[in-house]
Amino acid sequence: MLISLGHPKLESVVVLLLANTFATVFGAVGTPIWFGFGSLGLTEQDFIQIAFNSAVALVVGAYILVPFVFCILAPFKMVKENIIFLLLSLSGCMLPMLGISFVSYEFPSLIGGMIGLGISAVLVHFKVGMKPVELVASGETGRHPMDIATVSERSVVSLSSPYMSKSKIPESESTAKTMTRIDTATGEIVHLKRDDSNSAWVEDEEFVRPGGNKDDSEENKPEKQVSFNTDENREKHAEEQDTNANGNEMHQNGFEDNDRQVSFDDITESQRAIEEAIGPRKTGIAYVKEFLLRTSPITLTVLLLIITRIPQIGLNSLLKKTEPNFSIYFGTYGTFRLSVALVFQLENILTYPSLNWKYELLYTPFLIPFVLVSVITYIIYRKESSDNMRGIFRTVYGRVKNPAVALAGALTLVQLMITGEEAAPASIIGIVLSEAFQGGWIAIAASIGALGSFFSGSTTVSNLTFGSVQEIAAEQIGVNVNAMLALQVVGASAGNGICLNNIIAACTVTGLVIGEGKIIAKTAKFVFAFVAIATLIMLAFLFSGN
């Protein structure tokens, strides 16, 4: 979504990886807590206490770090000018999450995120705390700043917009050698260039628009068109044009006194393509129907996740049923089983009784909800689709096949680290360190959680791996066990920002081709800052009694 708004792919991936670190504590309906710590014999009240302690650390960390995270996408000055909007939007998400954690460890992130989305939409609609800013065109492509991009190479936007990026590795503004800015006095697009990152910007008179000819000729400049949906707006625009013709000056930031932007009234090629695809705007019941259908991919995904994760509904246990099944004996390689719920199992691998593998096809977030929702969405909008189902799957396969090789190696390493129960390398490392550090364990407890997520790509797996170690360490040094486990889960959540699995997956989805190390270099400083903040916050809970 950030990329579709015109932000560079690299910076968008970094920001979303960091944003993810504030949510996975309660991910998959609280799975990291109730399943990750499920073998420790904790009570329902213990789970809720862990959730609340974690939520406090998440809220404090978010208020401190999120404004700086947004500086990756926007200049610090812009973030500072809009800090009221940013804090209000952040509060709309984090405070409900904190409140819900008092009574639930399953829904804080899910409900908090949905409430926050609604509050942010209201804030944007009424421009609460928002300041007008100067819009800058993309330094990567010269795309109009109001143009809308897309990740899909076959969309109506990609096929219609000459500003659409075709490059695989976008340049940031700090390294770009070309840039397009808007002259707010005239509304004209000015193309700039420089020899290197240390040179001054100069006007580029030989600029060639991507996919087109030199646009310094009048015939290649896009014709300004204005899209209005009501007679009132047309009359308002005519009055504004008369006013501007009489010499009234616009503000330097490109906004008029009524806060309506005039420098970019002309719609862009991609906006025009979208309007042609979806037709005229609707009102009343038709608008509500259109809104529900257009947002159905997100709402259906959330709904299916909820109804398949809440045990009381009953689908949870049905999708994970291992009986009845049929089995095939493969000798020393193990015994293969397949249940009626499509749960694949391989037991006693290489004759080791505790070495088993299981894959719950219908419960694991793959066919349900993602493939199912994708197919439903395609059926609903197949007439508007620019590609057929076969072409869509071919595109997905092309993006997934190479990262799948890297993921296979990473997952193999994870299994080697966590296999063997007490004799597992990960457990040995944790126990030895806890005995060596004693009280100093508190300083590294969250980092241990982050280490688990770095290896596994999962907050839940990190908790499964190190939860018992954290519990033993808390008992040995005499601090609150629930607070120590909260520190573990917060650290594990933070570790998702440097996890190779997540980075590879994000690059695959966005089509970004770049070394994982470059992304980790940008996310690591925020991850460890979050770990330090969480540790300081958790001190108040650690010494509050057992």
Image (cartoon, rainbow, N blue to C red):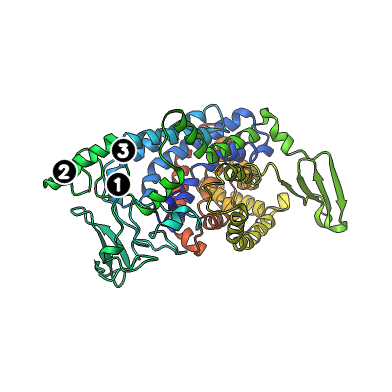
Q: Name the element at disc 1.
A: loop
Identify the residue at horizontal 64%, vertical 41% (top origin): 36
- Disc 1 marks a residue whose amino acid type is Val
Helix, strand or loop at label 3? It is: helix
Q: Residue 72: percent from the left, percent from the top?
A: 38, 53
209 is higher (above) or lower (below) than 267: below
- Whether label 1 touches label 2, CB < 8 Å: no
Residue 84 is labelled as 3
For discs 2 and 3, the disc positioned in front in the rendered view? 2
Marks 2 and 3, how far apart in space? 35 Å
Crowd tier of the residue under label 2, counting other residues whose Cα lies within 10 Å: few below 14, some 14–19, many 20 or above: few
Counting residues from the start of the chain, the first of labels 1 and 2 encountered is: 1
Could one spot residue 313 in this view of the protein? Answer: yes
**Amino acid on which the number 2 mark rests in the picture:** Asp
Name the residue that disc number 2 marks: 242
Query: Can the viewer see residue 542 in this picture?
Result: no
Asked if marks 2 and 3 touch (Cβ < 8 Å), the reply is: no
